[in-house]
Image (tube, coloured by chain):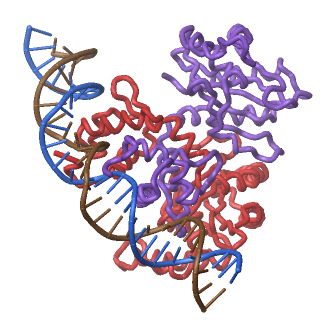
Chain colours: A red, B purple, C brown, D blue
DNA sequence: GCACGTTCTACCATTGAATGGAAGGCCACT
DNA sequence: AGTGGCCTTCCATTCAATGGTAGAACGTGC
């Protein structure tokens, strides 16, 4: 035995340890973590102990492993979305106040929309769980709003995955959605994510006219009033873009 | 040369890289990062490249280094404060609605209060910057509320640092603050953080009667109405505690 | 347009830090 | 008292990590 029988670097292993936590799971037993990360128990133990000495993880009594508060702090202080969220929050609050709907903010990462901020509808039980959640581009209005304003090349590359005509979703359908979103300046999806809700999103353009985020609302089907929502979202998106600079 | 001339492990180095970002700084040049982390340029480069291949960092063209979206996502999905924030958000929104003040939620980490959530006063420019911010226990109402409900041993250990009677703050003063907070069930500080504001915080107890967080508001001195604020905070704190379980 | 400074990136021989099986400890349950 | 599950520690082996060096890419001033 020597440095890694399996041919992976220390960095690989640390990443696997952090990624081993399933979504929404806060703590894991050491042995389970070792399993999930595909590491020998003793190696996992050593790694976790080292990381917890620095506060990136938290190794509690009995081998309970959590992410460290220090890691949460560092990431949230220096997150790449910090400027975006700061610029967007006042406008998101405005939308929430005026329309009383769930407001969300997403960025594009891979072929998915990653939700970076969310305000719940007033009066409803807050649903913060979906912060840091992902949705495939083609089944989220935010994803469509973002993708419809990307370069031709990126869109082409994206559409490749739907090339197989026997698939559930064909590239033609998605291409149609994107074209529509690009032409109208907003994207909408009714009853896709949840049968009773309607999602509407508009792109947030920075000063270089690149779509860096999407601002959206999720409304009950019954309360759908497109003519009121879209202008409000577009106005807010412009405000955010101006604040962003670039 | 071999594995680390300076006697630090790979884990140490990765931590130093992540910690190298000063508060609020989103991107760093590779060479500056190497400097700050105390690493040889080539080592820093290799490490950053490896981490960015996994998405924990983002190594852009020209050697621009940022924290990776994937890291932000993983940490926010599995953060140890997730349950706390989810339990607290509806109550924080209530406070914000009813009192129209800045509301915040903090936990104790070391001898500091770490702010894990914050809602801005309606109408004011959102101040999300202070999420993931820290304040020393003795100059934050949240810190005092938390510390005043910790064990005798921890309080004693904490007070050690003020033992020097020639220091700016003496242990007697802090002990007085803690005793007052423990007796009253809330902590208040006027004009300490900001000369024109008053901070009030109450502890959030879980079902085991351990103070796991502090719920607080920051109000302008002029609008100070203790008799209205404290009961509202205490009611909300109880609600959060009940939701938390444990 | 050329020389210079700065910063990023790639290479590769050297070697000590990382590795993981094995053994010991602790607790809970039978 | 025995058994199983889990955490923790130890330490000889060895290959992955290291970082000086050199080269590429860019910008800048003369």
Q: Is residue A125 above or below residue D15?
A: above
Looking at the rendered image, the quarter that the N terminus of chain A falls into is: top left
- Front one among B33 and A195: B33
Q: Decide if residue A107 is in sight here.
A: yes
Apparent side of residue C25 relative to residue B136 in the rendered image (left or right): left
Q: Is residue A136 above or below residue B222?
A: below
Apparent side of residue A166 relative to residue A201 in the rendered image (left or right): left
On the image, the x and y values in percent for residue B130 come to: 69, 40
Q: Residue at x 38, y 49 (%)?
A: A15
Q: Hey, which quadrant is residue A146 in on the image?
A: bottom right
Q: Hey, which quadrant is residue A236 in on the image?
A: bottom right
On the image, the x and y values in percent for residue A56 come to: 46, 38
Q: Residue at x 51, y 79 (%)?
A: A175
Apparent side of residue A216 relative to residue C7 in the rendered image (left or right): right
On the image, the x and y values in percent for residue B178 come to: 69, 12
Q: Is residue B55 above or below residue A69?
A: below
- Front one among B121 and A48: A48
Looking at the rendered image, the quarter that the C terminus of chain A falls into is: bottom right
On the image, the x and y values in percent for residue B210 come to: 55, 16
Q: Residue at x 76, y 46 (%)?
A: B126
């Amino acid at each position: 035995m020597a440095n890694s029988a399996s041919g992976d670097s220390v960095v690989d292993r640390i990443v696997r340890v952090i990624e081993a936590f399933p979504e929404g799971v806060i703590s894991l037993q050491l042995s389970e973590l070792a399993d999930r990360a595909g590491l020998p128990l003793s190696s996992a133990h050593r790694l976790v102990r080292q990381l917890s000495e620095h506060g990136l993880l938290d190794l509690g009594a009995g081998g309970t492993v959590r992410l460290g508060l220090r890691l949460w702090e560092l990431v949230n202080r220096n997150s790449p979305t910090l400027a975006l969220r700061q610029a967007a929050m006042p406008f998101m609050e405005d939308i929430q106040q005026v329309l009383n709907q769930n407001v969300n903010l997403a960025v594009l990462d891979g072929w998915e929309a990653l939700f970076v901020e969310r305000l719940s509808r007033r009066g409803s039980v807050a649903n913060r769980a979906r912060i840091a959640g992902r949705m495939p581009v083609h089944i989220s209005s935010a994803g469509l709003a973002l993708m419809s304003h990307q370069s031709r090349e990126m869109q082409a590359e994206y559409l490749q995955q739907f090339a197989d005509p026997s698939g559930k979703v064909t590239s033609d359908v998605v291409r149609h959605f994107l074209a529509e979103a690009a032409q109208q300046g907003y994207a909408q999806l009714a009853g896709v994510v949840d049968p009773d809700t309607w999602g509407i999103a508009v792109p947030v353009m920075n000063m270089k006219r690149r779509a860096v985020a999407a601002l959206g609302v999720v409304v009950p089907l019954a309360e759908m009033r497109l003519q009121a929502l879209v202008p409000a979202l577009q106005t807010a998106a412009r405000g955010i873009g101006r604040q962003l600079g670039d």
